[in-house]
Image (cartoon, coloured by chain):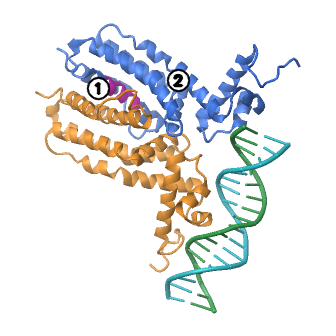
Chain colours: A blue, B orange, C cyan, D green
DNA sequence: GTCTATAGTGCGATAGAC
DNA sequence: GTCTATCGCACTATAGAC
């Protein structure tokens, strides 16, 4: 085989293998968490040998970190796109809330990703901070900017209001989906959205 | 009770050992999660032999479940006590929010407990459900009852409003404390409380 | 493939209660 | 002395990092 020695950087086809490994790693780490995942299972799930895994990633921590950073970038890019709001506040806020709620509740991977980020935020504080910087902060900022640039809404503290708006929605997902509260404390998504927009618009001359 | 309940092993002084084991288990499980904790370390942290641990708890899962159920009962009892609200809405809501925020942010154990409940909600869905039933649901219900019994607040959907109120606060804790967002997206607790009460009271004739 | 860690068991020894 | 909780430790079998 004209396969190069693996101590150095990989050649042309490197990207494919990395993709493959990350895919297997995602399956395992999201399902079992960091400590609950073995490198053997990652290799098996990826369809490569353990040696191949270790030729691309220094160790378990490195693979986990690379995976989670990548997921943070890709999986929540949608949120940043929606959050470019124009138009009437009532519609903009409704749409933002609906997209966030539907986007996440329909995709089990999002839910599991959120769970793992929180789960490992003790062992991997830097990952949590990357998540905050890459997702929470920009979404928050866009919403703050929108709220602040619409003085007719009469919102006294846009930064706090943005936290309330997004925080309510995210915590709704955590209770209903992540903590399996759907059947115990059921509540329709639409009622959350209705009440949230009601409160946000309560200061406007309506 | 000469030979107490047959389901329980050991004699009268058993409680001490159980307490000791649970204390060690708390230290380890809260610090490292379920998969990241070894029974040897639990025994060491508890200052007992592994055999003793296994004489009181059937296995690792049983010990973990017993610990977490106990913590759910004791650690958040305070919330249920506060949530017996009487008096003017503005004050009641402020006090509830302040107590919840201070209670949790000042006690690292609360934060870690919340983290572990979410972390293990995939592997131990029943624990998450116990948490919802014993803490989330009763607190939610008391707040709903309060909001609903004060029609002058003019809240269209008390159930959704209660979710928004508590969800905002809990998510604030998750972002600031659990995900280490304090320095990245700082926000004073008081501003959250001010804005939350502002929205809740926005329908009242003020 | 190697070396370490871990869940769970078994047993002899100890020390205290009656 | 008898009973028993507990300790300490050796042991198996399995799994995991690398």
Is residue A186 something that shows in the picture? no
Q: Residue furthest right?
A: A1
**Is residue A45 placed above or below A96 in the rendered structure?**
below
Residues drawn in magenta: A162-172
Q: Residue A160 bears which disc, if any?
A: 1
Q: Residue at label 2?
A: A72
The chain letter under disc 1 is: A
Comes first in the chain, label 1 or label 2:
2
Write the residue at 34% across / 13% down.
A92
| Horizontal and vertical percent position of residue A95 | 37, 15
Q: Residues within 10 Å of mark 2 (few under 14, many from 20)?
A: many
| SS for dot 2 | helix
| Horizontal and vertical percent position of residue B25 | 52, 56
* Residue A155: quarter of image: top left
Residue A53 part of the magenta-drawn span: no
The chain letter under disc 2 is: A
């Amino acid at each position: 085989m004209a396969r190069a020695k693996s101590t150095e950087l990989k050649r042309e086809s490197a990207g494919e293998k990395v993709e493959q490994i990350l895919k297997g790693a995602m399956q395992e780490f999201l399902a079992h968490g960091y400590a609950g995942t073995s490198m053997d299972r990652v290799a098996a799930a990826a369809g490569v040998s353990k040696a191949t895994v270790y030729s691309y990633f220094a160790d378990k921590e490195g693979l986990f970190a690379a995976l989670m950073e990548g997921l943070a970038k890709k999986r929540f890019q949608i949120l940043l796109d929606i959050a470019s709001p124009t138009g009437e506040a009532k519609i903009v806020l409704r749409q933002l809330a609906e997209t966030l709620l539907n986007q996440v509740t329909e995709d089990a991977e999002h839910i599991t990703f959120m769970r793992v980020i929180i789960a490992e935020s003790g062992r991997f504080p830097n990952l949590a901070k990357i998540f905050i910087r890459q997702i929470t902060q920009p979404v928050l900022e866009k919403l703050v900017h929108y709220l602040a640039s619409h003085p007719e809404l009469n919102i006294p503290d846009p930064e706090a209001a943005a936290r309330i708006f997004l925080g309510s929605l995210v915590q709704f997902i955590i209770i209903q989906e992540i903590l399996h509260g759907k059947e115990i404390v059921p509540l329709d998504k639409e009622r959350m959205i209705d009440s949230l927009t009601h409160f946000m618009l309560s200061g406007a001359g309506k």
